[in-house]
Amino acid sequence: MIDTHSHLFSEEFSEDFHQTVQRAKEAGVSHIFMPNIDDTSVNELLKACSEFPGYCFPMLGFHPTSVDNFSMEKVKKMKCLLSGEHPYVGIGEVGIGLYWGKTYLRGQRGVLDEQIRWALEWNLPLVIHCREAFPQLFEVLRPYQHTTLSGIFHSFTGTQEEMDEV
């Protein structure tokens, strides 16, 4: 078993992080992939993954629910973390999430598009968050359908027809 999406580096796991990872190992989980949340969580992510090298793998991304009026400048600064040798095995968690509201839809679209370009430039898969936003997400993804873009969907709330389109 592979855990493709875990935020074990977040504060909720600070007291039992090592025990949680040990339980995952005992349950037969062979790898844990950890998508980043935003510019404030990178250090915790890298620290957690460094404690279990070859088992926990970091991904770099800016979660759609972290998007606000200042996100694009933060995201563009994060891009430098991909230059040279870096530990990231994917771009995530990225996407569009409208479950909590549509205030920052335009910003989410721009941030997602920027991160799609990272995935293509560094040939890394995306971890896509799509919550109540399938049509909007695919408007951003559609121009890239004939590229090498790859990845997985997380928090997909679409219909069977939308899954077929994926």
Image: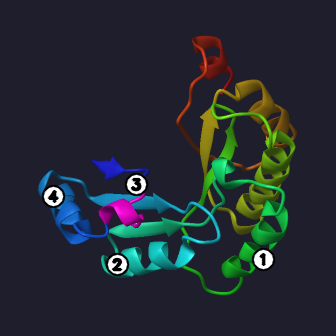
Mark 1 to mark 2 CA distance (whole Å): 26 Å
Mark 3 to mark 2 CA distance (whole Å): 15 Å
Mark 4 element type: helix
Q: Relative to 152, is 91 above or below? A: below
Q: Which residues are magenta?
A: 6-13
Left or right, 6 with reference to 24: right
Tell which tag, 1 or 2, sits nearer the viewer.
1
Mark 1 to mark 3 CA distance (whole Å): 24 Å
Residue in the foreground of this view, choosing between 75 and 101: 101
Mark 3 to mark 4 CA distance (whole Å): 14 Å
- Which residue is drawn at the image coordinates 77% and 70% (left, top)? 74
Q: Which residue is mark 1?
A: 77
Q: Give x and y (percent) for residue 130.
A: 63, 35
Mark 2 and mark 3 in contact (Cβ < 8 Å)?
A: no
- Which residue is drawn at the image coordinates 66% and 54% (left, top)? 66
> First in sequence: mark 3 or mark 2?
3
> First in sequence: mark 4 or mark 1?
4
Left or right, 40 with reference to 104: left
